[in-house]
Image (cartoon, rainbow, N blue to C red):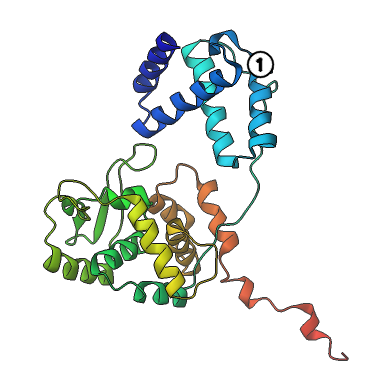
Amino acid sequence: MSELRKNMERDLQIKGYSTSTQDAYLKYVQAYAKYFNKSPDQLGVEEIKEYLHYLITVKKVSHSYVKTVYSALKFFYEVTLQREWSMKEIPRSKKPKKLPVVLSKPELNDLFNAVTNLKHRAILVTIYAAGLRISEAVNLKVSDIDSKNMQIRVVQGKGQKDRYTLLSSKNVEILRDYWKYHHPTDWLFPGNSMDKPISTRTIQKVFKTAKNKAGIKKEATVHTLRHSFATHLVEAGTSIYHIQQLMGHTSPKTTSVYIHISRKDILQVRSPFDSMVDF
């Protein structure tokens, strides 16, 4: 596997995949080979199908996990081994259609007020106010905050794309208060060491603690703040095109899910039961 691993790693780097994706793909192909105790170049369609079926039915892993394993194997066989990959022979697992959880503005207000640490509050507020992914928030630098043009520069977000998103006036106030107290110089939100950003795990713990303290029962995560940002923009009448640009989505189909979550028009619809005067 060592020579194959080296070749696959090279191919991933040539294609410009992020370091985290490279590590995940290499790990999943290695696990696949270990399952059969054979070099993956000696395995084919039937083994791929058997392994994916094993992950789904026995290991009962998440859809996103299976999706990533599928993509890793597809890359390995198509790119590194230069073999044909048939979608008919190896179908991709269908994703369950679930709408993301969204917090209302009153719930967000309770959540932010539950955070007493100024730095932690600034992080959560910025994630919501700018619609950031958690990885994008931790990698923000002081120079990415453009208060003159009221925008935040997101460097190398998902898909290794740069973009600009909103910097709200209230967010600026919170960030200024935070800066006056902590004086970050490079990373906007450094960890224990000023030369390294805060960890995503720390932010996740902060969010969970604040959610419990605020009495929010929804199955919300840090990523829920990003979903809430997009949904509230839809409810405010912002076009899907502009939301797509702010979120950094490649396809408008990804952004359109927030139309289904928005309650703007639904709340104006009356149930037919209300018109049954004789009941």
Which residue occupies the extreme bottom position in the image? 278
**Left or right: residue 24 compared with residue 43:** left
Measured along the vertical axis of the image, is residue 176 above or below residue 243?
A: below
x and y, in percent, of residue 158 in the image = 38, 41
Task: Say which quarter of the image contains residue 26.
Answer: top left
> Residue sitting at 57 percent across and 28 percent down?
70
Q: How many marks?
A: 1
Q: Nearer the viewer, residue 122 or 33?
A: 33
Q: Which residue appears at 21% of the width and 71% of the height? A: 173
Looking at the image, can residue 87 be seen?
no
107 and 246: which is toward the camera: 107
Please name the amino acid that badge 1 sits on: Val
Tell me residue 109's x, y (percent).
40, 76
Image-quadrant location for residue 12 = top left
Left or right: 42, with 114 as reference point: right
Q: Residues within 10 Å of mark 1 (few under 14, many from 20)?
A: few
The residue tagged 1 is 45
Where residue 194 sits in the image (x, y, percent)? 15, 51
Q: Nearer the viewer, residue 100 or 216?
A: 216
- On the question of residue 189 being in view, the answer is yes
Residue at image point 56% right, 22% down:
32
Q: Secondary structure at mark 1?
A: helix
Q: Quadrant of the C terminus?
A: bottom right
> Does 216 sit above or below residue 255?
below
**Is 111 placed above or below 250 here?**
below
